[in-house]
Amino acid sequence: MSIKSLLICILMFCNLLFSGALTAKWFEDSQAIMGTNIHVELWSDSPQQGQGAIQMVMDEMRRIDQAMSPYIESSELSLLNKHAAKDYVAVSKELFDLIVLSVELAKETGGAFDITFASVGYLYNYRAHLKPQQSQITDLLKAVNFRHLRFDSHKNRIFFAHPNVKIDLGGIAKGHAVDNAIELLRKSGIKHALVTAGGDTKLLGDRLGKPWMVGIRDPRNQHKQSVVLPLANTGLSTSGDYERYFEQDGKRYHHILSPKTGESAYEVQSVSIIGNRSTLNDALSTAVFVLGVQKGMDLLNRTPGYDGIIVDNQRKLHYSNTLVE
Ligand code: ADP
Ligand code: MG
């Protein structure tokens, strides 16, 4: 190779390097989907890839919302709730697997996480400040029990063995959506990304050599953080009594219900779970919220790979064992 052609090659290489470096940047977007705020940040070499990747995440969120929202009459979840007390209803493999996992988690959490909370749960309307009468709660509590769910795993069919059963995936679907979104990004070649759906966040890689700084907000002051954690390649989900609630007669009626009482759980103000799978972080944050400090920490300390931070109702912070070791 002549010196001239070598020089040309080097020049072309530099040009390629620079053009990549010049167009590589952070892309971000926020949209209201799944009744919450979806936020995406990612690093990409080109605007086409960057914007395409964000679009892909938002499309995935919309797809899951269409299938799993209780507010969309045609969703698979709504159809299941409408018909499964009469006969077995066939659902997609994705929904079937998520409901089976939810029941496994109900067993592991002693029923603290139970998607059948919804027969009572649907009587609350936090926006309209409506809560059920005690007699209505007592009546429907009989339907709150994951053991009422029957599965036909050959045909992905589900049956509710009690006439009043309703299920709701509000405590696990956003974690599932965030796991899916990060997996799609990883497969498309993205190396650094953050995806948040409400209280569920997952990180792909780090923030270009530095960790992502993810905050746990002060449950009583939305402008303050209680804790900020440096994280990479993992997930963090927070459940709080400030997300959806109203106050009446000095009491806070919020969206995390104890399946035993059909009322909001009061022992803590927020629970954050750190672990690789956001689907589990999401469900565990709800479960630990219901269980309270002692039983919640016991659960986390016997669950490898999943750590937690609790803000109790006196605003005191509690950390699971591996975070303080
Ligand atoms: P969000 O991110 O919406 O704040 P959380 O992870 O805190 O969600 O879960 C709260 C949601 O979980 C509620 O809105 C409701 O849909 C559902 N949920 C409430 N109580 C329970 C429970 N005991 N078991 C399972 N799901 C629940
Ligand atoms: Mg949750």
Image (cartoon, helix red, strand yellow):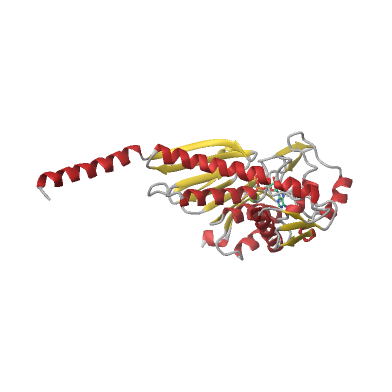
Q: Count up the numbered dots.
A: 0
Compared with residue 214, is residue 298 higher up or lower down, i.e. above or below?
A: below
Where's residue 259, x and y in %? 77, 53
Which residue, as the protein is rendered here, is positioned at the far top?
A: 128
Residue drawn where x is 76% and y is 51% of the image: 117
Compared with residue 8, is residue 292 higher up or lower down, i.e. above or below?
A: below
Where residue 245 sits, quadrant-wise, is top right
Compared with residue 111, is residue 65 higher up or lower down, i.e. above or below?
A: above
Where's residue 16, x and y in %? 27, 42
Q: Is residue 230 visible?
A: no
Q: Position of 136 compared to 206: left or right?
A: right
Q: Position of 121 compared to 321: left or right?
A: right
Residue drawn where x is 52% and y is 45% of the image: 195
Where's residue 42, x and y in %? 45, 43
Which residue, as the protein is rendered here, is positioned at the far left?
A: 3
Q: Front-most of 93 and 97?
A: 93
Where's residue 295, x and y in %? 68, 60
Q: Position of 62 compared to 53: left or right?
A: right
Q: Position of 167 compared to 191: left or right?
A: right
Q: Is residue 247 visible?
A: yes
